[in-house]
Image: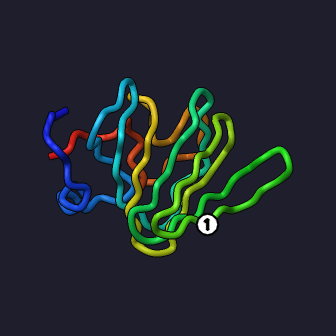
């Protein structure tokens, strides 16, 4: 990581891959990642950590499988939402969307439990910003 400021717009302009986050900063033992997303991700759950989402541009829908049943939260630009640990969720972006995610370093984008990973989803712990 660098000790210089990072422009999120420049970071997002530096890559085109969808569902393939770039690490823009670190806070203690957490990564701050940005990603371009569009279409569906996959159902997955993080057993040991919450997952924080901030929509920088576009709109993100997150399907949730909770004890009370399934529901979808809609996050327009500027919205934040935290998926609690252990809750199965499936992000979906109906339009090209830019997000910021905050989660522990080393956390897989597909969680600890997940459906089959489609080709368009990068199952990684994030990539260094080029």
Q: Residue at x 42, y 42 (%)?
A: 123
Q: Residue at x 67, y 44 (%)?
A: 88
In which quadrant of the rendered image does the N terminus lie?
A: top left
| Placement of 102 over or under 40, stated as above or below | above
Q: Residues within 10 Å of mark 1 (few under 14, many from 20)?
A: some
| Placement of 113 over or under 29, stated as above or below | below
Residue reaching furthest to the bottom: 95
Q: Is residue 23 left or right of residue 6?
A: right
Residue at mark 1: 74
Q: Nearer the viewer, residue 93 or 75?
A: 75
Residue 77 point in image, percent of width and height: 46, 68
Q: Residue at x 43, y 67 (%)?
A: 38
| Placement of 58 over or under 52, stated as above or below | below
Question: Which quadrant of the figure has residue 28?
Answer: top left
Question: Which quadrant of the figure has residue 10?
Answer: bottom left
Q: Nearer the viewer, residue 41 or 93?
A: 93
Residue 54 point in image, percent of width and height: 46, 55
Q: How many marks?
A: 1
Colouring scheme, one of rainbow, by chain, secondary structure, one colour: rainbow
Question: Which quadrant of the figure has residue 71?
Answer: bottom right
Residue 99 point in image, percent of width and height: 41, 57
Q: Residue at x 61, y 58 (%)?
A: 62
Where disc 1 sits, the SS reads: strand
Residue 53 point in image, percent of width and height: 49, 51
Q: Is residue 114 left or right of residue 119?
A: right
Q: Is residue 49 left or right of residue 2?
A: right
């Amino acid at each position: 990581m660098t000790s210089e400021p990072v422009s999120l717009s420049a970071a997002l302009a530096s890559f085109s891959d969808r569902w393939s986050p770039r690490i823009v900063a670190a806070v203690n033992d957490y990564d701050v990642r940005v990603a371009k997303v569009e279409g569906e991700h996959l159902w997955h759950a993080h057993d040991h950590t919450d997952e924080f989402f901030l929509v920088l541009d576009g709109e993100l829908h997150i399907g949730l499988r909770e004890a009370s049943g399934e529901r979808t939260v809609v996050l327009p630009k500027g919205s934040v939402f935290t998926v609690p640990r252990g809750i199965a969720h499936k992000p979906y972006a109906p339009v090209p969307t830019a997000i910021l995610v905050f989660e522990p370093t080393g956390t897989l984008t597909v969680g600890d439990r997940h459906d089959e990973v489609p080709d368009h989803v990068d199952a990684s712990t994030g990539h260094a910003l080029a």
